[in-house]
Amino acid sequence: MRNYIKILVALYRLKRQAKLSARKMRALQEKKLRTMLHYAWGNSVYYRRTFEAAGITEEQLDELPLSCFPTMDKKLFLEHFDELVVPQDLRLCEVREFDAAENADRKPYKGKYHVVHSSGSTGKPGYFVYDEEAWNSMLVGMLRAALWNMSMPQILSLLAKRPQIVYIAATDGRYGGAMAVGDGISGVGASQMYLDIKMPLDEWIRQIKEFQPNIIIGYPSAIKILAELVEKGSVQVNAVRVISCGEPLGASLRSYLEKSFGTDVVNFYGASESLTLGVEMNPEEGMILFDDMNFIEVESGAMYLTCLYNFAQPLIRYRISDSLMLKAAGENSPHPFTRAVGLLGRDEDILWFEDGSGNKEFLHPLAIEGFCVEGLMDYQFRQVGKDAFEMYAEITESASETHIRTELLEQMKKILSEKKLDYVQFYVNFVDEILPDARTGKKPLISAERGFDTEREAWQDEKSVIAG
């Protein structure tokens, strides 16, 4: 009960900040930025060294524009993880061992560090670590976003009814969304249920009927599948709120979800590097970015994040692969926050398969994102028929194609079996390089090209195909 009250008080204070003037918000953000820069200088070996190498002195930390400070990307972050983090008991190799050894129960590492697993497009996963203070700050920010257009009396009324919340996404690992949603729901005393995207549709239907959720959170592409089940009459859902996260939400899909569930859709924006970045209620106004929690820049088309609340693992001018444009808040804006306009996040497709009897089942790209095989540098999928898809694999020069193919086939066979997709054929093709999308600069997991008419004889290698 004490924790519940503490969360509500923190939420009330954070909601009040959303009513500041644009000028006061910029002053608050600037104050938090300077605090973070000084902290990184005094406590992080990596930042002290890189700042000095850039010619920055301690006296200049209060006056130099953020654009004068060095940037970093995921590669640099992983290379210098141990000297970037502040706590002395955090080491990347040990965090990897923890992630590999423990079940996905989302318990904190060493009882005090929340580890978020981020696979991305690299062969080995990266890890973003939040201590308790940073994690709690993030959770309150997440609640503010999820309940964005509600007053405190409305929020108290909603929570008093102990809402039934279903989260539909990748839930079987240390994904930031699953971890944050679970802890946030527990903190406000709501009931929760996870629907994993690898779960067969008939199991979705059974659990939805039994649980009767009234708040839906998840990937928009996964929520869309639930909406289609509602439309077909397979399940009934009386939703009071739908919260989309993890993927871009297009205008047409938003309209479809709002019509299907009869309620507004909250579009939540977060990343592993900072799980609470912004929220969108009105697409015409753009995404509201939480300037009181992060400092986001766009420079030469690249997005850079400085997290203002995570002092355990400072991220200063960290490059994010999302593409967007920024619009500063005016003094008469309804909210004092910067707006993001344009593409946000990854726009992935879903693979749909059909058996000989006409039964359909889907495979979500994020269910197969976690491949981690030594020597595998990058990969991409492409559907080549109603019952087949292929994988393009980019490997290191010293890696064994035979070994990697064997590992991939074993992992994929297990995933397909869990989804009751044993009839689906899966091919592995090795390529020299997987190029990013020319429009977004990203490497989509699912290739937009379709090859349904491609002759399959070219792939009929007994070592490179799972045949149901």
Image: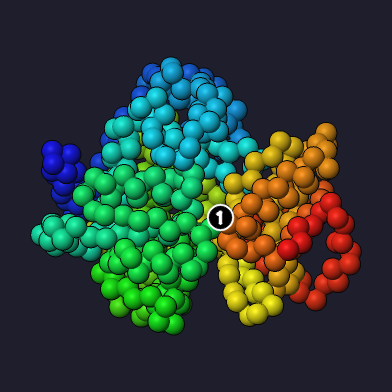
Q: Residue 308 versus residue 26: which sits nearer the camera?
A: 308
Horizontal and vertical percent position of residue 19: 18, 55
Residue 89 visible (yes or no): yes
> Which residue lies at the image location 24% right of the left edge and 45% below the top edge?
187
Residue 20 visible (yes or no): no
Is 106 on the left-hand or right-hand side of 435? left
Relative to 405, residue 330 above or below: below
Residue linked to disc 1: 366
Q: Quadrant of residue 397?
A: top right
> Which residue lies at the image location 63% right of the left edge and 80% below the top edge?
358
Identify the image quadrant of the C terminus: bottom right
Amino acid under disc 1: Leu
Relative to 99, residue 206 above or below: below
Relative to 71, residue 180 above or below: below
Horizontal and vertical percent position of residue 91: 51, 22
> Which residue lies at the image location 46% right of the left edge and 64% below the top edge?
203
Identify the image quadrant of the N terminus: top left
Q: Residue 88 versus residue 382: which sits nearer the camera?
A: 382
Is 23 on the left-hand or right-hand side of 180? left
Is 205 on the left-hand or right-hand side of 100? left
